Amino acid sequence: KNEVEQSPQNLTAQEGEFITINCSYSVGISALHWLQQHPGGGIVSLFMLSSGKKKHGRLIATINIQEKHSSLHITASHPRDSAVYICAVRSGGGADGLTFGKGTHLIIQP
Amino acid sequence: DSGVTQTPKHLITATGQRVTLRCSPRSGDLSVYWYQQSLDQGLQFLIQYYNGEERAKGNILERFSAQQFPDLHSELNLSSLELGDSALYFCASSLQTGVSPLHFGNGTRLTVT
């Protein structure tokens, strides 16, 4: 079973700061997802990665397959970025269900 | 809007009862996944269907069952409900199985009293 560890668990920052959230996993994967969950509860898929780096607006996600590690970066953070960010992995070997990290609770203060 | 529709949004029921949660996937998506999010366990994968067939099973209890119909909508049936089944239940869909992006519904919040 894959174990997914996220850090930090909680993060409070000021508007405009550069944010980094980390995710480590224990065994080989076929894909890694970064998800965003707002206080209302809905989940939005931000990125799906199997290698390298992806960018969407102010969000950047990177993955290092050899080190079994991924990071989510937010540039020029804004209060509307306040949410829980969840890392999830799909194991290799054809298993399709995701294993989730416990999430990082991010608060951006104005 | 993800295009994935879940009904109902909220459900309150008593222990021992049975409920059915419904999910309509995004148009064109063949794969449907069910997830449970509780305060103590976080998000957990329950089960996946692909084009009407069960594809993968996760931490789904024997009291729970699911199916995907020919029109690709899916239902999750929860029976003999216990207080610990209170959770948010999410459905997600993807075009195919494997490494297609996931699209999540807004969830059904189940409260068992």
Image: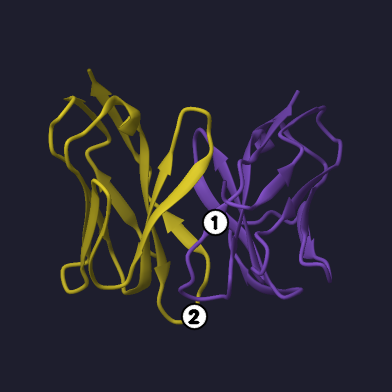
Chain colours: A yellow, B purple
> Would residue B42 be visible to someone looking at this image?
no
Q: Mark 2 lies on which chain?
A: A
Q: Residue B56 vs residue A110: left or right?
A: right
Judge the density around disc 2: few (<14), some (14-19), many (≥20) Cα neighbours within 10 Å.
few
Identify the residue at image location x=52%, y=65%: A97
Type of the residue with mark 2:
Gly
Secondary structure at numbered mark 2: loop
Rendered location of residue A24, percent (x, y): 24, 57
- Nearer to the camera, B7 or A104: B7
Using the image, determine if residue B93 lies above or below residue A79. below
Please tell me in which quadrant of the rendered image residue B81 appears: top right
The residue labelled by disc 2 is A94
Q: Residue B5 vs residue B14: left or right?
A: left
Point out the residue furthest to the right here.
Answer: B17
Judge the density around disc 1: few (<14), some (14-19), many (≥20) Cα neighbours within 10 Å.
many
The residue labelled by disc 1 is B103
Q: Residue B26 vs residue A86: left or right?
A: right
Point out the residue furthest to the top here.
Answer: A110
Please identify, in this view, whether the residue under mark 2 or under mark 1 is nearer the observer.
Answer: 1
Using the image, determine if residue A7 lies above or below residue A56. above
Q: State whether discs 2 and 1 lie on one chain.
A: no
Identify the residue at image location x=77%, y=49%: B22
- Nearer to the camera, B7 or B86: B7
> What's the CA distance linking mark 2 and mark 1?
20 Å
Type of the residue with mark 1:
His
Please tell me in which quadrant of the rendered image residue B54 appears: bottom right
Identify the residue at image location x=82%, y=67%: B71
Q: Residue A72 vs residue B55: left or right?
A: left
